Image (cartoon, rainbow, N blue to C red):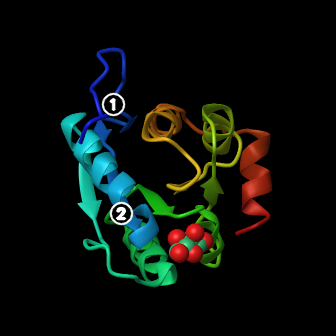
């Protein structure tokens, strides 16, 4: 748990007055980063639902992508974070669900835009691509950004 820190300027993401419920999932390639994120998000005051995996045994990422997406589709979580080695498998698997808009991000700008323009409800990260400080920066930016609505709503509706 070396890296993770709570930053006083970080605004806990809210929807109305509710704190955001976040489902997290990973495969073996994302385990260490997922555990760090769970720890940090809980410390920051979020309600976290860790669907696994929980060991370094090799597992299949679609299983955990489906679990996190199910949490969102069934209304138990507002957002999901999925972590595998590259984030690619998780994003492909998550985007097979009609109600899911999963964004694979490697830096904070696209993370913010994925919320503001695309109303992304799942963030995918590659643990073999990102250092954990960068991953945390991406997550913080993503959670702190609201959907802009307007013309973007129409475009999202076209995919529904
Ligand atoms: C597992 O070795 C790796 O393939 C997986 O974590 C992910 O990168 C797939 O996209």
Q: Is mark 1 within 8 Å of ligand 1?
A: no
Viewer-side residue, 22 vs 88: 88
**Are circles 2 and 1 on residues that touch, CB within 8 Å?**
no
User: In this rendering, would 44 be left or right of 79?
Assistant: left
The kind of secondary structure element at disc 2 is helix
For residue 39, the mark is none
Q: Is residue 121 visible?
A: no
79 versus 85 height, above or below = above
| Residue 45 spot, x, y in % from top left | 21, 37
Viewer-side residue, 7 vs 72: 7
Q: In which quadrant of the rendered view does residue 159 lie? A: bottom right
For residue 31, the mark is 2
Mark 2 surroundings within 10 Å by alpha-carbon count, few (fewer than 14), some (14 through 19), many (20 or more): many
Q: Is residue 75 visible?
A: yes
Q: In which quadrant of the rendered view does residue 13 lie? A: top left
Tag nearer the camera, 2 or 1: 2
Mark 1 surroundings within 10 Å by alpha-carbon count, few (fewer than 14), some (14 through 19), many (20 or more): some
Q: For the residues marked 2 and 1, what is the alpha-carbon distance in whole angstroms?
A: 24 Å
User: In this rendering, would 85 be left or right of 159?
Assistant: left
| Residue 158 spot, x, y in % from top left | 79, 64
Q: Residue at x 27, y 63 (%)?
A: 50
| Quadrant of the displayed image that contains ligand 1 | bottom right
In the rendered view of the protein, which quadrant contains the N terminus?
Answer: top left
| Residue 160 spot, x, y in % from top left | 70, 69
Question: Which badge, 2 or 1, is on the more N-terminal residue?
Answer: 1
The kind of secondary structure element at disc 1 is loop
For residue 12, the mark is 1
Residue sitting farthest toward the top: 9
User: In this rendering, would 38 be left or right of 101?
Assistant: left
């Amino acid at each position: 748990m070396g890296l993770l820190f709570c930053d006083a300027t970080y605004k806990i993401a809210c929807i109305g007055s509710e704190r955001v419920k976040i489902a997290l999932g990973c495969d073996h390639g994302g385990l260490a980063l997922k555990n760090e994120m769970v720890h940090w998000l809980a410390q920051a005051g979020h309600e976290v639902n860790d669907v696994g995996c929980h060991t370094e045994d090799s597992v299949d990422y679609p299983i955990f992508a489906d679990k996190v997406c199910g949490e969102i589709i069934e209304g138990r979580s507002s957002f999901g974070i999925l972590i595998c080695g590259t984030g690619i498998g998780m994003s492909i698997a998550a985007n097979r669900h009609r109600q899911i808009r999963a964004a694979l991000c490697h830096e904070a700008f696209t993370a913010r835009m994925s919320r503001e323009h695309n109303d992304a409800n799942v963030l995918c990260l590659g643990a073999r691509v990102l250092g954990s400080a960068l991953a945390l920066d991406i997550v913080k930016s993503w959670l702190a950004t609201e959907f802009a609505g307007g013309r973007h709503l129409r475009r999202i509706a076209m995919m529904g």
